Image (cartoon, helix red, strand yellow):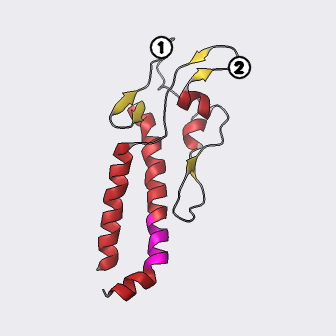
Amino acid sequence: MPFGKIAQTWPSNKAKILRKIAVTSKLFFIDNWQKQGFMGNTLYKWKPRKSGGERPILVLTGRLKASLKTTRVTGDQIKVVTNVFYAGLHNYGGVNSSGRNVPQRKFMGKSSVLNGVIENEIRGMLKMFIR
C-alpha cells in the first residue's frame, strides 16, 4: 500500500486502534476479579477478608466489576472509569465512613503487562492496515 493511502486512511484506522485498546483495557481490568489480584508487573494478590467467607473478594453484588466502562475515545486517549462511589476506597485503600481500615485491593491502574498486550495489538493492527 502506498504511503499516501496509509496517510489518507490513518484517521479512521487510528480510531479503530483506540477502540480496540479501550475494550482490551476494560477486559484486562475485569479479569482481575478472576485472578483475585491486580496484574501490574506481576500479579499482586488481594488481601483476604478477615471474616473469610466463600465468595470471591470484591464481590457482593457484582456492581463494582459491572460498573467499569470506557469513556468516549477521543484524540489520543482512552479511559476506563467507574461511577461507583466506593471504587476508589478499594482501589487505593483507606478508611471507610465507619472508621474501619480497608486494605488496598487494586483492580485498575497502570500495568506493564497491559502495556505489552496493547503494544502487540497495535503492531498486529498496523500490519493488517498495511496489507
- Looking at the rendered structure, the kind of residue marked 2 is Ser
- Badge 1 is on which residue? 52
Q: Nearer the viewer, mark 1 or mark 2?
A: 2
Position of 51 relative to 84 (above/below):
above
Position of residue 45 measured from the top left corner of the image (x, y, whole percent): 39, 26
Position of 90 relative to 11 (above/below):
above
Q: Is residue 5 left or right of residue 11?
A: left
Which residue occupies 34% across, 76% down?
129
Q: Give the magenta-colored segment's residue range.
A: 10-17
Taking the view exactly as shown, the residue that stands out farthest to the right is 97
The 10 Å Cα crowd at callout 1, few under 14, some 14 to 19, many 20 or more, is few
Q: Residue 97: which disc?
A: 2
Which residue occupies 32% across, 50% down?
116
- Looking at the rendered structure, the kind of residue marked 1 is Gly
Q: Is residue 87 left or right of residue 108?
A: right
Of labels 1 and 2, earlier in sequence is 1
Callout 2: helix, strand or loop?
A: loop
